[in-house]
Amino acid sequence: MSNASTQVQDTYNQQYHSENNEWRQLGGQQKAKNILDLCSRFKSAKTIDIGSGNGAVIAELDKANFTDELSSLEISDSGIAAIQERQLKSLKSVQKFDGYKIPFDNKSFELSLCSHVIEHVEHPRLLLREIARVANYHYFEVPIDFSFYVDQKIQHYLDYGHINIYTPALFKFLLKSEGFEVIDERFLFTNHAQIDFQFKHQPLKRLTQKLKNLIVSLSPYKKIKPNAYAVLCQHNGKGLSIF
């Protein structure tokens, strides 16, 4: 099993010592809302969150009594420290992992959560196979960074740590080719609070972004270029099969 490269590991170790706490909190609230919406059909007694960052998302889930028992995996030392400081009542454990090997037995969890992680992973199929192994149901959310000129914005996305670029269809192709069956999905758009924060000193850009999101969300194009895509899956046990 591969480990995250040393350069990637070192980068993320200090990731959550930087500023941007307010931005991360706003993002955490929205990502948790997306999880609650898509996973509301069942109450998960045992849940694992893979790539918890600074814990902003699981803190919101904790407030909502989303699960009885939550386990967290995080690649960065700074993220683990931030999660531990939150003292979440549903959090059973938070462990550092190498980005691939999940230290739990088969089907230890009812639900796995993996929100805004796969776009950062050097070998996504390896992580997906581990996720399929440890839980019965799986929630994924990824940003939709694709554009026809994405190759001209490489440094922009690398600055965010995004090394995989998806459309909803391309992400579903990845999941389905690995044996995941889609139960439900959402095509997501940045909410007004996040836009207001991101463009707080640029009123014209703020208005333009809100109008753009509204127009796209009301058109068939929303299934091609939303701001993010979320999916609830169950694995069929078969995995990748080619030729």
Image (cartoon, grey):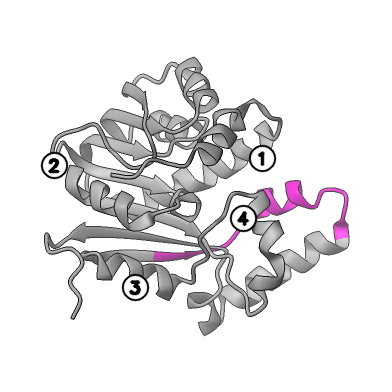
Cα separation between marks 1 and 4: 12 Å
Circles 3 and 1: CB atoms closer than 8 Å: no
Q: Which residue is mark 4?
A: 191
Is 99 covered by the magenta stretch?
no
User: Marks 3 and 1: which is nearer the front?
Assistant: 3
The percent position of residue 7, horizontal first and vertical second, equals 55, 39
Secondary structure of residue under mark 1 = helix
Point 43% across, 41% down: residue: 4
The tag on residue 119 is none
Residue under numbered circle 1: 23
**x and y percentages locating residue 62 in the rendered image:** 39, 29
**Residue drawn at (12%, 64%), measured in percent from left and top?**
238
Quadrant housing the N terminus: top left
Q: Residues within 10 Å of mark 4 (few under 14, many from 20)?
A: some
Disc 3 designates what residue?
A: 173
Residue 49 placement: quadrant: top left
Task: Classify 10 Å Cα crowding around label 3: few (below 14), some (14-19), many (20 and above).
Answer: some
> Residue 171, how many percent across, how many down?
40, 67
Q: Which residues make up the magenta segment? A: 186-203
Of circles 1 and 4, which is in front?
1
Q: Is residue 39 visible?
A: no
Q: Hey, what amino acid is under mark 4? A: Asn
For this rendering, which residue is in front, 203 or 121? Answer: 121
Q: Is residue 52 left or right of residue 179?
A: right
Residue 107 marker: 2
Q: Quadrant of the C terminus?
A: bottom left
Find residue 172 and report its image quarter.
Answer: bottom left
State the SS at label 2. Answer: loop
How many numbered marks appear? 4
**Distance between the Cα atoms at labels 3 and 1?**
31 Å
Secondary structure under tag 3 reads helix
Residue 181 vertical position relative to residue 109 in the rendered view, above or below: below
